Amino acid sequence: MMEIKVEEISELIKKQISDFEKKVDVSEIGTVLSVGDGIARVYGLENAMASVMSLAWL
């Protein structure tokens, strides 16, 4: 049976903590109200501005 070595576990945990990288992925989700002539009316995209092209995943 394998013996647990506290020093090895401690070093592994310290290495994982030091290599940790924070990543944040921000997205907004809205509702399409209507579509016509290349124009879509969308509700719920607070940070969208005029002439902004949004991606729609159907």
Image (cartoon, rainbow, N blue to C red):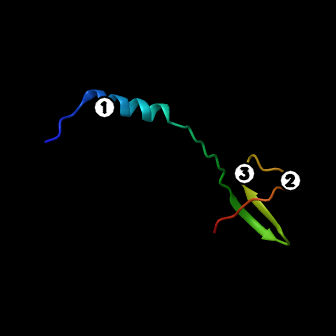
Percent coordinates x, y for residue 47 in the rendering = 75, 46
Identify the amino acid type marked 1: Glu
Residue placed most toward the observer, 40 or 21: 21
- Label 2: element kind: loop
Q: Say which residue label 3 marks.
A: 45
Left or right: 30 as drawn, with respect to 41: left
The N terminus lies in quadrant: top left
**Up-down: is 40 above or below 46?**
below
**Does label 3 or label 1 sit earlier along the sequence?**
1
**Up-down: is 10 above or below 49?**
above
Residue placed most toward the observer, 58 or 9: 9
Residue at x-position 76% and y-position 67%: 34
- Label 3: element kind: loop
Residue at x-position 82% and y-position 50%: 49
Q: Say which residue label 2 marks.
A: 50
Badge 1 density bin: few <14, some 14–19, many ≥20, Cα 10 Å? few
**Does label 2 or label 3 sit earlier along the sequence?**
3
Left or right: 51 as drawn, with respect to 19: right
Tag nearer the camera, 3 or 1: 1
Q: Say which residue label 1 marks.
A: 8
Distance in Å between CA atoms under marks 1 and 2: 57 Å
Badge 3 density bin: few <14, some 14–19, many ≥20, Cα 10 Å? few
Distance in Å between CA atoms under marks 2 and 3: 11 Å
Identify the amino acid type marked 3: Leu
